Image (spheres, grey):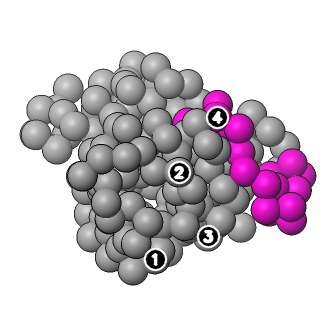
Amino acid sequence: MDKCPTKMTATNINKEFTKRPASFIKHPPTGKKLAHSRAALPYSDLFSNKLLMISLIREGVSYEFFDAIQNFTPFSEKEWAQFLDISTKSLQRYKQSSKSFGPLQSEKIIELAEVTYLGLDVFGDIEKFKLWLNTPSFALNAIKPIELLRDSYGKEMVAAELTRINYGILA
């Protein structure tokens, strides 16, 4: 089942995450810029603050935070399981046990959240971004961008292409 809202934008995601307590960050790194980490966290700040991302990845993304991210991405549960290299049954076990993901899976979750945020910023809405992800791209050697998201290098290629599109540089 696709949990993706049809009118989700980067602005709406920021508003939603700012309202929520940032309870998913158990041990935020110290420093002046991170004083707001436990109270509220704009989604965009997660991607602009690399130390915060590293801290979150190292401690492991909680299922609660993964679920919040999953609700704002265009990926189905089956696609998430493929990206995380686990079965859908294992993904459901994470949900039942409220277990945190390991560092490798946590990093993949953050990477896909980052790509989604960038895609929403470029395309303005989740449906247009989802269409782009599932359409072969000339700039990506006629590969669908979603097919490249399983690997970090592929994710970087997709993010770079989204950035080029954002700046009007089309292949």
In the picture provided, is 167 more to the left or to the right than 130? left
- Secondary structure, mark 4, is helix
Task: Say which residue label 4 marks.
Answer: 103
For marks 1 and 3, give the one nearer the viewer.
Answer: 1
For marks 3 and 4, give the one nearer the viewer.
Answer: 4
Query: Which residues lie in the magenta part?
Result: 89-108
Whole-percent x, y for residue 165 in the image: 19, 40
User: In the rendering, which numbered label is found on residue 3?
Assistant: 3
Q: Amino acid at mark 1?
A: Arg
Whole-percent x, y for residue 153 in the image: 46, 20
- Secondary structure, mark 1, is loop
Asked if residue 76 can be seen in this view, the reply is no
Q: Earlier in the sequence, mark 3 or mark 4?
A: 3
Q: Amino acid at mark 3?
A: Lys
Q: Earlier in the sequence, mark 1 or mark 3?
A: 3
Cα separation, mark 1 vs mark 4, equals 23 Å
